Amino acid sequence: MADGGGQAADRLDRHRPRRHHHHRGVQESRGSSHVQKTFGFHPLAAWCANTTESLAMLLRPGNAGSNTVADHITVLTEALAQIPGSSTAKILIRVDGAGATHGLLEHLEALNTTRRTVRYTVGWKITEDDEKAIAGLPEAAWETSVHQDGSLQEGYSVAELTRLNTREGWPEGMRLIVRRVRTTRRHLKKLTDFEKATGWRYCITATNIRHMWGIAGSGHSQFLDVLHRSHAGVEDRVRTNKAMGLNNLPSASWEVNRGWMLAANLASDLDAWVRLLTLHDTDDLADAEPDTMRFRLYHLPARLADHARRRWLRVDATWPWAAAFTTCWQRLTALRAVP
């Protein structure tokens, strides 16, 4: 998904792959062993929203904190290093709730220079002070949320919470956008007393976006809410990387699993670029899942033959995606070699 304003967009998220069942629950990590009730590794990763490729991933022990500032900065630094210089003038960084720390937000603010504009939207952990601020919002301050296509999202509302925020020590100019939805059964276990009393489930997004030049309404709370919610697409990237091998790490060895992680990410990136460069106009393959790509293209029913000192790939003419494979191959071979 490409973001407005020609920006390169990064997404940071976490996921827990399964380890080989012989080692589940007890593992040795960087010289120290620990026993835990969860899976043995807890990677932190960043993806590029424009290309869907994985920019960086840090393999961590399963007991690693979700909001460890140093880890977030490490992954973010490595991710930004992957973005070509021509695309670094405007960057949008979206992080889930684990990114709402003083250290990370201060780091994001410090990335801004005269030649680079860094905007961010970050999930926000709601405290009692935030709930008091929400309680102070008049009903007229709430506006109906919108879908990605701009249509109204009935039953969901957003409002600006910035001026009512009483929490100190956060970056100057940071805005808070609050979103609410009527509670349902799936919310019951996570509701606070305030949410039970009001009948609404709340979530807050922190951002430094005032407006985006050339994009009408980009400073409006509805726009910012939609912009951050599109971060949910990162779950597709997590699922893709798991399908490429990250769902199961093969070893109790840290280094072996790091190598496996790298190989899985390379496979995921190659898959993303094949679709971007060669299948962008093929409706059923442009956004295909890895299993679909394997069945239709990667596991091709074909035979490689030698004839007249040349090698020929003989594709079964009855294969439904033979034309798609041929087009893909021709476009790949027509690409200029990287100097």
Image: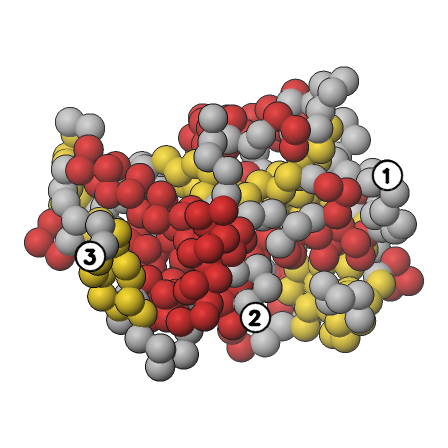
Q: Nearer the viewer, mark 1 or mark 3?
A: 3
Q: For numbered disc 2, what is the local secondary structure?
A: helix
Give the residue at mark 3.
Answer: 306
Q: Earlier in the sequence, mark 2 or mark 3?
A: 2
Q: Which residue is drawn at 37% across and 35% down?
A: 58
Residue 213 - label:
1
101 sits left or right of 113 in the view: left
Q: Where is residue 150 in the image (x, y as percent from the top left)?
A: 80, 65
- Image colouring: secondary structure
Regarding residue 127, the answer to whether it shows in the image is no
Q: Residues within 10 Å of mark 3 (few under 14, many from 20)?
A: few
Residue 283 - label:
2
Identify whether 235 is placed above or below 288. above
Q: Of residues 234 and 68, which is closer to you in this image? A: 234
Q: Which amino acid does label 3 sit on?
A: Asp
Regarding residue 139, the answer to whether it shows in the image is yes
